[in-house]
């Protein structure tokens, strides 16, 4: 029997069925909301429609505000590499097409290189003091980062995942989170892709087979629950 000190469960309407969570053991992870992916002149602008990714910015802003007000742990990630590219394996550097590749010089500095202007998180979603910012060399947020340690230290069981892109870094993080035993919720309008069809199918994959990878809900539902639970 739970003690009176056990945080109450709240119900969040989601697909494929409602998710029950405790705010004290829930974290928001904002994936790679960086200038290089979301602003003209960055890595994402090399033949891609940056406007498609920008659609996630406003929902992420609302989600971030609600999460902070509810006292959730908020974690930001940035994909990138050191200037010497020693942490970028050849298999990754060989991927991709277009005029700019990782490490090349672009309008916002070297593409996806730590310390460059383009590597920064966009101002609209700037981390608050004390919020962890994880620099990751891979697609998923667990690989070669302190994410698992941070989550364990805070007693986190549920991950609310937002950011870009839906089918790559968001999916990789959600999949590994699921494998590690976390309940993962992806916020459908707070994630985005350069390819609308990939976005749609990636979300469908998460909730297929009774939620094989987790849950999906929109930002309105998530923000409503966070706001009401904090009232």
Image (cartoon, rainbow, N blue to C red):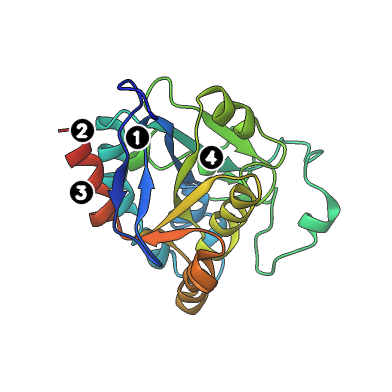
Count of numbered marks: 4
Counting residues from the N terminus, which is met first, the one under dot 3 or under dot 1?
1
Residue at 61% across, 43% down: 141
Residue matched to label 2: 230
Residue 58 seen from this side: no
Counting residues from the N terminus, which is met first, the one under dot 4 or under dot 1?
1
Pointers 3 and 4 in contact (C-beta within 8 Å):
no
Q: Residues within 10 Å of mark 3 (few under 14, many from 20)?
A: some
Secondary structure under the numbered disc 4 in the rendered image? strand
Residue matched to label 4: 77
Separation (CA) of disc 3 from disc 1 = 13 Å
Picture quarter with the N terminus: top left
Residue matched to label 3: 224
Separation (CA) of disc 2 from disc 3 = 10 Å
The residue closer to the viewer here, 125 or 197, is: 197
Separation (CA) of disc 2 from disc 1 = 9 Å
Separation (CA) of disc 4 from disc 1 = 21 Å
Residue 32 seen from this side: yes
Pointers 2 and 1 in contact (C-beta within 8 Å):
yes
Percent coordinates x, y for residue 85 in the rendering: 77, 41
Separation (CA) of disc 4 from disc 2 = 26 Å
Residue matched to label 1: 23
């Amino acid at each position: 029997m739970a003690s009176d000190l056990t945080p109450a469960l709240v119900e969040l309407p989601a697909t494929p069925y409602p998710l029950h969570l405790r705010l004290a053991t829930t974290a928001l992870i904002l994936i790679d909301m960086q200038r290089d992916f979301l602003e003209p002149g960055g890595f994402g602008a090399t033949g891609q429609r940056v406007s498609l990714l920008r659609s996630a910015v406003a929902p992420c802003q609302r989600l971030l505000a609600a999460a902070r007000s509810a006292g959730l742990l908020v974690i930001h990630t940035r994909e990138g590499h050191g200037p010497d590219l020693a942490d970028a394996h050849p298999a990754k550097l060989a991927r991709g097409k277009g005029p700019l590749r990782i490490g090349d010089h672009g309008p916002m500095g070297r593409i996806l290189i730590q310390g460059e202007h383009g590597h920064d998180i966009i101002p609209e979603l700037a981390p608050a003091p004390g919020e962890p910012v994880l620099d990751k060399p891979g697609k998923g947020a667990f690989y070669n980062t302190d994410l698992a340690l941070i989550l364990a230290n805070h007693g986190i069981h549920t991950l609310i995942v937002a950011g870009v892109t839906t089918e790559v870094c968001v999916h990789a993080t959600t999949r590994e989170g699921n494998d590690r035993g976390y309940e993962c919720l992806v916020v459908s309008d707070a994630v985005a892709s350069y390819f609308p069809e990939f976005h749609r199918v990636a979300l469908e994959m998460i909730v297929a087979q009774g939620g094989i990878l987790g849950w999906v809900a929109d930002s309105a539902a998530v923000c409503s629950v966070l706001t009401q639970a904090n009232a």
